[in-house]
Image (spheres, coloured by chain):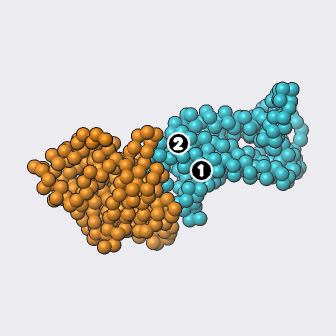
Chain colours: A orange, B cyan
Amino acid sequence: MDVLIEIERLTKRFGSFTAVDDVSFNVARGEVVGFLGPNGAGKSTTMRMVAGFMQPTAGTARICGHDVQDDSVAARRCLGFLPEGAPTYPEMTVEGFLGFCAAVRGFSGSDRRQLVHDAMTVTALDDVRRQPVETLSKGFKRRVGLAQALLHDPQVLVLDEPTDGLDPNQKHDVRLLIEMLAPKKAIIISTHILEEVGAICTRAIVIARGKVVADESAAALAARGASLDQVFRELTLAPEPVA
Amino acid sequence: MTPMLAIFRRELAAYFATPVAVVFIVIFLVMSGTLTFTLGGFFARGTADLQPFFSFVPWLFLFLVPAITMRLWAEERRLGTIELLLTLPVAQWQAVVGKFLAAWAFCAIALALTFPLVITVNVLGNPDNGVIAAGYLGCLLVAGAYLAVGAAVSALTRNQVIAFVLAVAACFLFAAAGSPIVADFLSQRVPVLAEVARGLSITDRLGGFSRGVVALPDIVFFVAFIGFWLFANGVAVDHRKAD
């Protein structure tokens, strides 16, 4: 298998609090990993370290073979990252913002226009291309963030809550989009929405208190109990083992 | 270089996309003009030069430049766009330098718009335009020095008001370090520090430029000063980006 994301004993401590505790897993091309866990479990922190935004306390991650700490710029070139909350520059137009992202990634001229056009088509942003991002609704803003992550057709996608704030139709569109992209890429998606995992993920990783508590196919995870909801509750509410 | 240029362009355009640019430029032009003609006694002096203008500009910049730099990093942090910017494939120094150069170019535009003063003085008399050019160069370097200080301070906080107040205070230290009050005070109590304070004084350095002397040590001082604060800016971004 063609492993594109390697996460190796990744650990992050803030003072005495361990946000991410010895997390390791690999993601191969064609896999869509659903990254699940309650709020504060360490999902976003893990994703930020994979994207090279936060320095791990210990361990490391590699994207397409590039270490996110030693070879950070090369790693980020292979990565499309949607940060939590899909931040964008509010005064820029949709087209301007995506153009900026493409320019930073080294595209210019007609290549850049083509990439921006394709990204706007695939995320259905064409109608609002000349509007400043701050005037858009939450769902549109999220799609602008998504367009930014897809822009350069990266091998690896790390999306932090891509469907948060979208209406059911838009959620459906994003799922279709991810399904379409899946065969050629390695994708990690964090989400709170459990039905999403069954719908689009080939694999589910559940994280609680910074530790991986389950790593198996969505079907296997659901088969552990009466419903996915119940399995999730049992896994993430399990009492801390007494040392 | 490409990512830095893209950041430079985006930042410079951002000033003009919001009322910041108009407010800054209008206030700067009105105040520099008023001070030159009233307090500076432009006509009463009977000399065809811009000496009064050059003596007020650093004090205007003291308040206006931190107003530009306060948003530089603090706003990125507040909006969360810092996570987007620093997970694009840019080296951190490219982001730091790109932002700084955009702010500097903006100050240069504001300074260039004072050209009617140059025309006026040329119509009324026969000034030494070399001296005037040196004075403008000095003002630009002072703006750069204040910008570098302000940008570094902005990277330490997500609150723009704090960034502004701290930057004004820090710039004031370097502006006032060479004033007679500080010099007298220090030479009586701690003579060692008096030399240091004079050496770090921005207004002292500007004196030479406004008399038409472009001395290498002064240029080296400004380049080193800006370089040091940009380095501090990079360190601050690195350490506090995820807070």
Q: Nearer the viewer, residue B1 or A239?
A: A239
Q: Nearer the viewer, residue B156 or B205?
A: B156
For residue A233, above or below residue A113: above
Q: Which residue is painted at 78% across and 41% down in the image? A: B200
Residue B121, how many percent across, how many down?
82, 46
For residue B39, above or below residue A110: above
Which residue position holds label 1? B234
For residue B153, above or below residue A29: above
Q: Count residues near mark 1 (Cα–Cα under 10 Å), then give few for <14, some for 14-19, many for 20+.
A: some
Quick check: can you spot residue A170? no
The N terminus of chain A lies in which quarter of the figure? bottom left
Q: Which residue is painted at 73% across and 48% down in the image? A: B225
The quadrant in which residue A220 appears is bottom left
Label for residue A116?
A: none
Residue B162, how many percent across, how many down?
56, 34
Which residue position holds label 2? B74
Residue A153, how many percent across, how many down?
38, 68
Chain of residue at mark 2: B
